Amino acid sequence: MTETVSSPTRPVWLIKIGGHACDDAGALAAFARAAAAITARLVIVHGGGPDVDRIQKAMGRTPRFVAGRRVTDPEDLEFVEMALSGLAQKRIVRALVGAGLPAVGISGVDASCVRAALVPELGRVGVPKKVSVDLIHALLDRGFTPVISPVSTGPDGNAVNVNADEVAGAIAAALGVDRLLMISDVDGVLVHGTVRPFLGAHEVEPLILSGEVSAGMIPKLRAAALASRKGVNEVWIRATGQMALALPSGTRISAKDHSASAPPEPLREADLLAGVFAFPRIMLTRGKGSWVWDDQARPYLDFSSALGVAALGHGREDFADLLREQFANLGHCSNLYGNQPSLELADRLIRSSFAKRVWFANSGTEANEAALKFARIFGQAHGGPGKHEIVAMKGGFHGRTAAALAATYHPEYRRPFEPLLPGIRFAAFNDLDDVADVISDATCAVLVEPVQGEGGVIPATSAFLEGLRALCDRHHALLIFDEVQCGLGRLGHVYAYEAYGVTPDLVTLAKPLAAGFPLGAILIGARVAPHLKPGQHGSTFAGGPAACALATRVFDEISRPEFLLQVNERACRLRNGLETIVKTLPLYSEARGKGLLQALVVADGQDLEPQDIIRRARDAGLLVTRAGDRAIRFLPPLNVADTDIDLAVDIMRRIAMDFLSASRREAPTSLSLSHRS
Ligand code: PLP
């Protein structure tokens, strides 16, 4: 069901925009576009200082401020109301309406929205005392975007000037908004010259006392801290600038997590974790959609999608809710007992495929490990112990446990662990003659990735997979597709085998299946299912209710025809972008891949290693990974935005231009994310 603008299920955000930001027509239009791109329902509270200044000065009066708040003599109040509830407000409303938001201007006076207590030493100035949210709710419920001027009603029933940050904080708390964004001229709260990504509410007064923050930041910080104390979940002070408004950026003020502001001694990976990775790595702390942030609050566009796992994007609150609910009900039950969510998932997988049965695993490796065991069971049943050989592909990757590693080609991964499981024979990928030479009646299965991922993003040809099917049939062997990386929507079909029109006997699935909760699965066809007996395989964790409930939700999203259509459109956009780079910049020799699993291949003879390009991309805010010796892999979330595809292509294009111009001793072009607004 599509949500309407007024859908009460959508979160509500309050955005406070200051007078300076809405004084400049270009900045205001950019803000309006950014606001219109937010999917949450919006309430806008605005200032209008420059308008008030202009009128005051025109009337021969001098604007005066105390601790960031405007002193307002009774004779100034008319000008204030004229400027805020009139000039500034209508300019903002027009911009928002122009950007497509149905904005309606009101003030704290309307329907007694905000009642204020007077602060007599500042004149007709007040602080919010009581907020009535009925009018705001009525507007939101009808799909309007309330735009609120801070002029409010004083105890005597007359108008009173209230600081817009304070009004924003008070309304945010009264409404219980999901997020309060206080837009500032600076990127966040600057402490000793750098933006603090996090500020405990308890730190606000000491900061003000120390003189570290001043002028307009004082009421803003106090209002932010108060809103957080009153239960507003997310309070941010940030600029509109570089990052889209929907993305967390700037300083988060929270009354909840005091420890975050005084981090303990940093824990170092190299001191704690087994040295099987190269440390240190970027430490990621959060993600939203196709974006992730590191522990320095740096954003990255994640075109690895956590190695294909976060295929529906990061930070999915609906997934978190589902898991919370399932865990509160039944988190796990082991394989001694059955559970309904696993049946629902199995039912979907079977209905959507050739499978007769499903086996659940915890990872891609384990799914392959089990598939190889099932192949041996099948071989035993059809040809006795002699029919045990597996044919796997050169360049193939199937995982790191004993049998999966034995079927993985990469010599460096294999060598330290030899001797590996016997009976695995390798043939050249996309070379049917070579497979025909290696396969025999001793073969119980042929294992292949429809698109080799780790091996360099190399799609199989249709003729190759069709030929493998025929060879397997001739030798009574199983055809196993490892779709751990290329299955579940990645190629624009639910399963990769559908993209080729070739039906295998077993398919292994994992990565995106439960969106980050470990889960793998094997689709088991009619030739294998009858041979599987109790006790032949098992796992304490596999097929647990939490993982399966989440996977069912993921599956329903991925398998929608419109979704798959969009994956294909996004894949075309990405591929076209990469092709353009290859055509114009000789750093790369080829763009290749299928669906949203694509790669740029670094041309031979170029003095730049793929790893260097990956590092440059990371420094420019784009996460990509290597595949094979020469390929840079693009594995974005399946629901990646078009603008993010364009941004990734642009970053790659500029890296190539910088490199090529530097090698021609020309000045490099600058590279940063600053063009993202
Ligand atoms: N098979 C393929 C094709 C893969 O790409 C991978 C991982 O990258 C695996 C198997 C192993 O999966 P996991 O890391 O979940 O064990």
Image: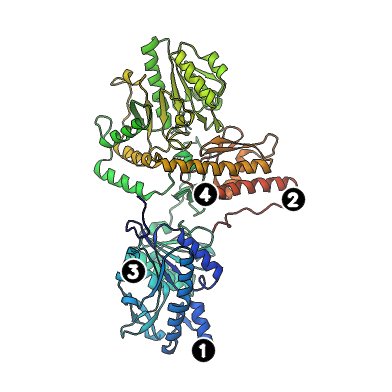
Q: Position of residue 646 (x, y in %)?
A: 56, 49
For disc 3, the marked residue is: 136
Pick the residue in front: 20 or 498: 498
In the foreground, 305 or 132: 132
Q: Which residue position holds label 1?
A: 59
Disc 2 packing (10 Å; few <14; some 14–19; many ≥20)? few
Q: CA distance from mark 4 to mark 3?
A: 34 Å
Counting from the top left corner in percent of width and height, residue 365 is at 43, 29
Q: Amino acid at mark 4?
A: Asp
Q: Secondary structure at mark 4?
A: helix
Under mark 1, the amino acid is Met
Q: Is residue 351 above or below residue 329?
A: above
Residue denoted by label 4: 642
Callouts 1 and 2 close, C-beta under 8 Å? no
Read off the residue under disc 2.
Answer: 666
Nearer-N-terminus badge (1/2)? 1
Which of the two discs, 4 and 2, sits closer to the camera?
4
Q: Check whether the beta carbons of the residues at disc 4 and disc 3 lie within 8 A of each other.
A: no
Nearest to N terminus: mark 4 or mark 2: 4
